[in-house]
Image (spheres, helix red, strand yellow):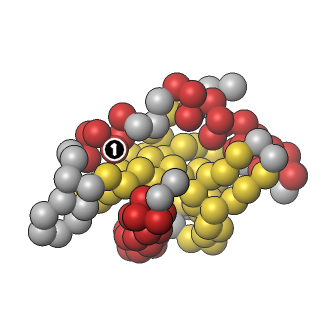
Amino acid sequence: MTRERLELGAFGEELAFRKIKLLGYRSILRNYRCPLGEVDLIARDGDTLVFIEIKTRKGKTVGYAKEAVNERKRRQLSKVALAYMKSKNCCDIKARFDVVAVNLGQGEPEIEVIKNAFDLAY
């Protein structure tokens, strides 16, 4: 991955992090990694554990960023979420998957939070 793409992703993650904090999410863990993969953010929204995938695009529509969370990515995120919940012994609590789509076009960034974006896909 190029340095420019890494910087774009990091900037988008920071914007998404700020947005979800404004929405009241708490206890946030960034870039959780395990042998099965990675999830960008893990947070709490009330009594729900939320696994958040962030997609940042430059000069495209927010819809384009949302579409990047395809079936393969949903399966991978599901596996990581289950591994996290098992490792933290919290399989009995509510959980969901959110997607934050960030568009860095001209002017102000567009940030859309899609709650409950998809169901467990594994």
Per the image, label 1 sits on a secondary structure element best described as helix
Pinpoint residue 120: horizontal percent, then vertical percent: 62, 31
- Between 15 and 91, the one nearer to me in the picture: 15
Q: Does 23 sit left or right of 121 as displayed?
A: left
Where, quadrant-wise, is the C terminus in this rendering?
top right
| Direction left: furthest residue | 107
* In-front residue for pair 74/10: 10
**Foreground: 96 or 7?**
7
Q: Position of residue 84 (x, y in %)?
A: 77, 50
The percent position of residue 104, horizontal first and vertical second, equals 25, 61
In the rendered structure, the answer to whether residue 73 lies left or right of residue 83 reads left
Most foreground residue, 2 or 28: 2
Q: Which residue lies under the disc numbered 1? A: 65
Which residue is found at the position 63% from the left and 30% from the top? 75
The residue drawn where x is 32% and y is 52% is: 57
54 w.r.t. 23: above or below: above
Q: Quadrant of residue 58?
A: bottom left
Q: Report the residue at 47% width, 41% height from top.
A: 116
Instruction: Give the answer, above or below, for where 27 lies relative to 96.
Output: below
At a point 46% along the width and 53% down the height, the residue shown is: 54
